[in-house]
Amino acid sequence: MPPSSPPGWSGGKEGKRRAAQGRSRWALSFVFSRFPRPPLLLCGEDEWFSPTIMAATMKKAAAEDVNVTFEDQQKINKFARNTSRITELKEEIEVKKKQLQNLEDACDDIMMLDDDDSLLIPYQIGDVFISHSQEETQEMLEEAKKGLQEEIDVLEARVESIQRVLSDLKVQLYAKFGNNINLEAEDS
């Protein structure tokens, strides 16, 4: 008798004898009423299985039916590389946007200063601070903001082009693998 058989129910010859006596219905109803989980069913002599286990086995078998070709693996690798690249580009865009905000704050602070031409404002170029007049510093900040905004626009265009490639790859991979592949980003 298998260890998973319900109390009062024995498989094999005893189960066949009970079935011949018409008591198997009672035993199956006992199994259904006694166990809140999916019932264990007798599928052969001394063999028990659960519908839950069978469904998992069938799902696993369905997943194994799909063959992954070299081209498919290349597409999956390309998808992973591009997803990683998009993450890096988005982080770079965030850093550049913070720099742009800092430049805008500096411009606002300089505008609030009095129009005193004798006031020199230090402006950092590389590792060195160079003092400039308020007007020159304002012009340099505007140029830096313009250059930084152009860099952000280029990065965002690259992200959009990569996203188009990813959506094409998703369509192709989901068409072949269906639910057997997960291409959605994990939010963490």
Image (spheres, rainbow, N blue to C red):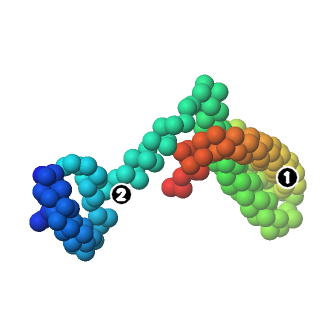
The vertical placement of 66 against 135, above or below, is above
Of marks 1 and 2, the one in the foreground:
2
Residue at position x 54%, y 45% from top?
180
Picture quarter containing residue 138? bottom right
Residue sticking out furthest to the bottom: 33
Alpha carbons under labels 1 and 2: distance apart: 69 Å
- Foreground of the two, 65 or 136: 65
Whether residue 3 appears in this view of the structure is no
Whether residue 44 appears in this view of the structure is yes
Picture quarter containing residue 164? top right
The residue tagged with tag 2: helix, strand or loop? Answer: helix
The vertical placement of 67 against 31, above or below, is above
Percent across and percent down for residue 147 are 83, 45
Residue annotated with mark 2: 51
Residue annotated with mark 1: 142
- Foreground of the two, 102 or 163: 163
Q: Earlier in the sequence, mark 1 or mark 2?
A: 2
Residue type indicated by callout 2: Pro
Percent across and percent down for residue 182 are 56, 47
Residue type indicated by callout 1: Glu
Residue sticking out furthest to the front: 20
Sort mark 1 into few (<14), some (14-19) or many (20+) by Cα contacts within 10 Å. some
In this picture, residue 4 sits left or right of residue 117? left
